Structures are given as structure tokens and as C-alpha cells.
Amino acid sequence: MIKVLMVASEATPFAKTGGLADVVGSLPGALRSFDCEVAVLIPRYRAIDLGSARRIYDSLPVWLGGVQHQTSLYQAGETPFYFLDAPALYDRDGLYGDSDGDYPDNAVRFAVLSRAALAVARRVFRPQILHCHDWQSGLVPVYLRTVFACDPTFLGIKTLFSIHNLGYQGLFPPAVLPQVGLDRRVFNIKGLEFFGQVSLIKGGLNYSDALSTVSRKYALEIQTPEYGFGLDGVLRARSADLYAILNGIDYGNWDPQTDPYIAAQYSPGDLSGKRLCKQDLIGEFGLPELAVTRPLLGVISRLTPQKGTELLIEIAPQLVEEDLYLVVLGSGDPVYEEALQTVAAACPDRIGVRFGYDESLAHRIEAGADVFLMPSQYEPSGLNQMYSLRYGTVPVVRATGGLDDTIDEGTGFKFQEYSAEAFLAAVRAAAAAYQDRQGWEALMRRGMLKDYSWRASAAEYAALYQKVLDDDKQAASFSQLQHQTQMRG
Ligand code: ADP
């Protein structure tokens, strides 16, 4: 039995802004079948209802830079999930920010989470592995290997840092160092310094025993200047410790045979329900009934440059000329929302848009659309293309990251170059293929029968935990010594 404490900023069903939450919410349960006992620590945001949780620690004070942060700890669920309650830091509507932008105290908010993780490891759930996810938990290995390097409580604990999106790095001015309780000596190129700023993700990358990311292609891409966001050198230096494990899908939530949100359930053996789902979606977006005979394209996305939103906006008018229909559910950059609103207003009987976060509508789009579009600039793993496969909604994707790893010519359509022309050509190829009903249904079924469940990925995480634990003890203590030496300057 391997004991793992995951530290993250979001997890379904409690708090979600993207795919990270799906992973942290589903992976622990899947790991149970592989002899791993997992607990998860996340902040207690305002939206998390403590109704079914119990308070297990009234006071778990966290001292950082001479300031005492009052926190308490709640526990819920089978996994278990621990919620770090610190109202001054987390009792807010957003996870990371509001309409004015990121919260100005994000460095302290997630430093407190990281430091509290070590208090949980000391007093509540003693892990062999601390599994950290993205920049918000990047300071866990830093504290472990610096401030607590000589603390016998933590001897032998290993750290795995998973990169879910290298584009978000947790960059702050050097003035935050004392506030997060770190010595200036970590502020060097082999530590947290990144072009004059403090980078929390770099802490995770430099101080963890092993690194992982969420697809094979992305693991290669992030070691190149094009996709490395300035950290490709750091990742190349650690390439021997960098592993790739594709995200899995929770088919308990995403399966057209059981999905309670959709108008009619269906399966690879009986696709008739999908037509009803399409009619339902057409009705929801006020498109003409006639649309049922033509390819209906769907998008569910954060509206950010990463997701290729500008390519979508650029080709939208041409899609109309091609006699296609489009529905979009998204939230994000107001500039993109406005641009999408404008193209939809010009062709209201062809293009439907909806802004905001809507779980139920996301399921109805997956079920009701014929084709799912993901023209991402980069995509670490991507979940929606895998949901789409299961729903018989044929993906058109840019060949990057997890999209490239999960979609092939037997299940969807790919384009290489990040350009509107290449994207449009792939959509045209899909629309042409749609004309051959038999061929199209065979394409749908091949996708529906793919298995991207958590089972395979959880087995790989379990094997990686074991490997990290087994790794040459001498090597581990050597790296510990190195960090200590660096600290002593
Ligand atoms: P990322 O984490 O980069 O946003 P992923 O494809 O890995 O991308 O995961 C996105 C997740 O968020 C999926 O579960 C998707 O259905 C969901 N999602 C994204 N935008 C919305 C939205 N506006 N409404 C509902 N769900 C959304």
C-alpha cells in the first residue's frame, strides 16, 4: 500500500475551473484499485458546501514570514478530501481572481496551502508521496527540501510534481519571498528565479523528485522553446525525471448510455438517441429544425488564446457559407465573448453562443453535436476530445499535445499548422465525410469504443509512485544534499 497526499487548487465535485479539477477529483478513486491510499488537500473556497464535511482540526496555524495564518481543516468523502479553511484567504467567489484580475495575494494564498500540506502530512495523513499539481502547489517540495530539509518527520517522503498546464506559472515579484517564508537564497536560476520574478511552478520543477505531465506529445513539446514558456531549458535538464501519463476520463459522469443530462441515451449499438439529442440542442440554441440534416459543430471551451478561440472566430463566417451549424459554450476573455457574439448575431439561424459555465449544457453539446472542434494552440491533455469520442461526436483537433496522442484518422480529423486555413480544411474534410452516412457511423463507433478510462492511467501513476519510492536512495539523498548546499549558499 502506497500512501499519497495530493495537493491541488481544485477538484471535482467541489471546485472546478478546468481539466485539473477532473483529474484531481477522479484519479484518487481510480488509484484505490492499485493499492494506493490517497488523500487530497484543496482550499475551502466560498462555493464549497461544508454540509457533509466534518471539522477535524480546529486550528492548524501556518506561520509564514512572521505572520500567523489561522486555518482549520475539514474532511469529506471517501477519498478523503481535506479542505483547508482560511476565510481571510479563500472565502471568496473566485478560485484565482475576479473581474479585476488575479487576486493580488495569490502567492500567499497558495503558499499557505503548500505549507499546510506539510502540517497535514505531519499530523493527519502521513504520506510516502506528496503529489503536487501545477504552480499552486509548487512550494510544497521547496519547503520540504529547504525549510524542513533536516526535519526527521519528513525523512523519506518523496515528491511528484504534475504539470497540467505550463502556461500558468505563478509568477510574482521578489518582494513576496519573505511573505511566503522563503530565504532569498532560493532566488537563483536553479531555484525559483525566472527572469527577475519568483516562479512557483519553477519551484515544483526544480525541487521535486520526479515530474510528470499529461500526455506524451506534451512532454516532448514543453522541452522546446515553442511550447516551453521559457522553462524548456529547466525541463530539458530534468528530462530523465519527466514522465508522461495521459489523463483518464470518468465514464461514470461522461457516458451517453447513462448520462442524466441528455435528451435520450444511446450506445454504439443503438445510435438513434443521438438524433434526439441533436434536436434538443438545435431547440436549445433556437436553430432551425432543418439543421438536423446538416453537420452540427460543437465547442465547449475556456475562451483563451490557448484554445485557438481566434481561429474559431475567424472561420465562423465561412462555416455558414459551407452550410454548417455551430454551437459554442464558453467563458473567458470578454474580447472573445464579444467577437463571438458579433458573428452569432450576424447569422442567428446558423450560430448559437452561450457564455458562462454550464455543466448540463456541456453534456448536451457533447451528445447533440456531430463534430467537436478543438483548434488549440497547445493542449496538455484535453478532456473534451475524449468525451466527444465516447459520445460519437467526431473530433476535429489541432495535432498538439494530448489531442495528437488521442485522435487519429480512424476516429477524427487533425490539422498541423496553427492557421485558420488549416483548421477550415479539416472541418471541410469532416463535413465531406459526414455525407457518407455509413462511413460516418463507423467513424463514430470506432471513437465510442475507445477506452480512455482512468484504469490505464491510474496503473501508470501507481507504477510511477513505486518507481519514485524505489529510486536509488543514494541518488535521493544526493539531491537533498545538493539543495541543502545551495541553501547554505
Ligand atoms: P482545460 O483544463 O485547459 O480548460 P480540458 O479539456 O482539459 O481543458 O478540460 C476542460 C473541462 O472543463 C472539461 O470538463 C469541459 O467540459 C469543461 N468546461 C470548459 N468550459 C466549460 C463551460 N463553459 N461550461 C461547462 N464546462 C466547461
Image: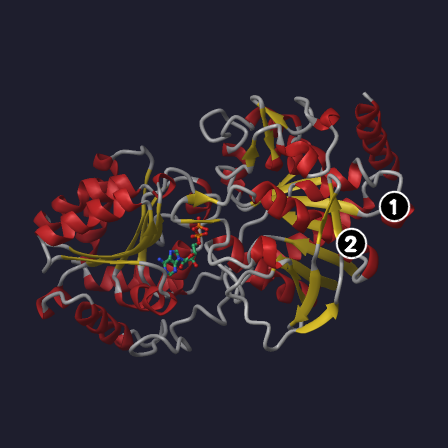
Left or right, 5 with respect to 250, comes to right
Left or right, 254 with respect to 72, comes to left
Left or right, 242 with respect to 289, comes to right
Q: Give residue 119's mark.
A: 2
Residue 381 in view here: yes
Q: Quadrant of residue 236?
A: top right
Q: Give residue 429's mark.
A: none
Helix, strand or loop at disc 1?
loop
Within 8 Å of ligand 1, the CB of disc 1?
A: no
**In the image, residue 411 lies at what x, y percent?**
36, 54
Quarter holding the C terminus?
Answer: top right
**Rendered position, 302 above or below 415:** below
Q: Nearer the viewer, mark 1 or mark 2?
A: 2
Q: Give residue 155's mark.
A: 1
Q: Amino acid at mark 2?
A: Ala
Helix, strand or loop at disc 2?
helix
Label 1 and label 2: CA atoms lie apart by: 14 Å
Residue at image position (9%, 54%) is 347
Considering depth in this image, is 81 or 306 the residue closer to the camera?
Answer: 81
Residue 209 in view here: no
Q: Which quadrant of the frame does ligand 1 lie within?
A: bottom left
Q: Quadrant of residue 139?
A: top right
Packing grade of label 1 (10 A; few <14, some 14-19, many >=20) is few
**Rendered position, 340 above or below 293:** above
Left or right, 110 with respect to 440, comes to right
Q: Amino acid at mark 1?
A: Leu
Query: Given the current orientation, which residue lies at the most extreme right position?
Result: 152
Residue at image position (29%, 73%) is 271
Residue at image position (25%, 61%) is 370
**In the image, residue 250 lies at what x, y percent?**
51, 65
**In the image, residue 259 lies at what x, y percent?**
40, 75
